Image: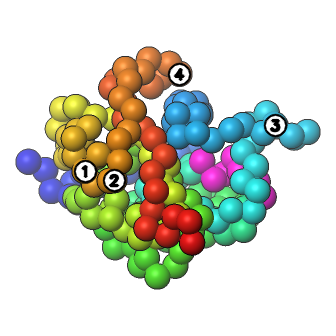
């Protein structure tokens, strides 16, 4: 079994200089739709999500968070443990998105958000249950999309299951075989109530 550091190095090397991100971003549009996000085209781009003043925490959003395609947020934060090229952080700053180089297991959930987003990242982590626990404490709702029943390999030390995710999230996600826009596999997704729901 590989170590967490080897897994993160593999992931960083896979993304490389992060310049050609189209493949990942096309897949993100699938994740977004499955997580219940509605596209709101504007006069600049068809690829826009109007967040209506909400605050969002993106756990594991990496070098090209979905938040980069969003407008009208009150606060936006990305947390990810990998160190990417400097220009990635300059782009986040220009978009008024906070970025912290920390693992999802180490989130300080004293800071509260309307929504927490988790997509295609938990299979890369040490403790996906801890990350979900932090997400539930941090947000009113959790939007999640993850691949399940996958082989454990370097860079992917976790094999997520429907049973495990349902247990950790305290709800029931939808399971579906997906094959579109480069997304291929058995997916688990849904919208879940955080501990602050209704407050």
> How far separated are the C-alphas under marks 1 and 2?
6 Å
Which quadrant of the figure has residue 25? top right
Query: Percent x, y for residue 8?
Result: 30, 55
**From this viewpoint, is residue 28 visible?**
no
- SS for dot 1: helix
Task: Work out whether 45 lies above or below 98.
Answer: above
The percent position of residue 132, horizontal first and vertical second, equals 34, 59
In front: 93, or 135?
Answer: 135
Q: How is the image coloured?
A: rainbow
Q: Pick out the residue farthest to the right.
A: 43
Marks 4 & 2, CB-CB < 8 Å contact = no
- List the residue tagged with mark 2: 169
- Name which residue lies at 32% across and 53% down: 170
Q: Residues within 10 Å of mark 3 (few under 14, many from 20)?
A: few
Q: CA distance from mark 3 to mark 1?
A: 36 Å
Choose the circle earlier in sequence order: 1 or 4: 1
| Quadrant of the snapshot with the C terminus | bottom right
The residue that mark 3 highlights is 41
Which stretch did the figure color magenta? 66-72
Question: Residue 20, percent across and down?
Answer: 57, 37
Answer whether labels 1 and 2 touch (C-beta < 8 Å): yes
Residue mark closest to the camera, 3 vs 2: 2
Residue tagged 1: 167
Residue at x-position 68% and y-position 62%: 54
């Amino acid at each position: 079994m590989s170590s967490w550091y080897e897994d993160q190095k593999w992931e960083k090397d896979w993304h490389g200089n992060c310049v050609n991100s189209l493949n990942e971003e096309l897949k993100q549009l699938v994740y977004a739709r499955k997580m219940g996000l509605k596209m709101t085209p504007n006069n600049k781009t068809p690829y826009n999500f109007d967040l209506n003043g909400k605050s969002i925490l993106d756990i594991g959003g990496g070098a090209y968070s979905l938040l980069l395609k969003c407008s009208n947020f009150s606060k936006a934060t990305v947390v990810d443990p990998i160190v990417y090229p400097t220009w990635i952080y300059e782009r986040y700053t220009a978009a008024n998105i906070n970025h912290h180089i920390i693992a999802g297991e180490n989130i300080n959930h004293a800071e509260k958000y309307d929504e927490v987003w988790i997509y295609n990242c938990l299979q890369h982590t040490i403790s996906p249950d801890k990350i979900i626990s932090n997400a539930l404490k941090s947000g009113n709702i959790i939007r999640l999309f993850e691949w399940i029943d996958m082989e454990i390999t370097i860079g992917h030390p976790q094999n997520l299951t429907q049973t495990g995710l349902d247990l950790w999230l305290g709800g029931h996600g939808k399971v579906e075989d997906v094959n579109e826009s480069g997304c291929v596999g058995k997916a688990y997704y849904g919208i879940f109530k955080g501990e602050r729901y209704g407050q």
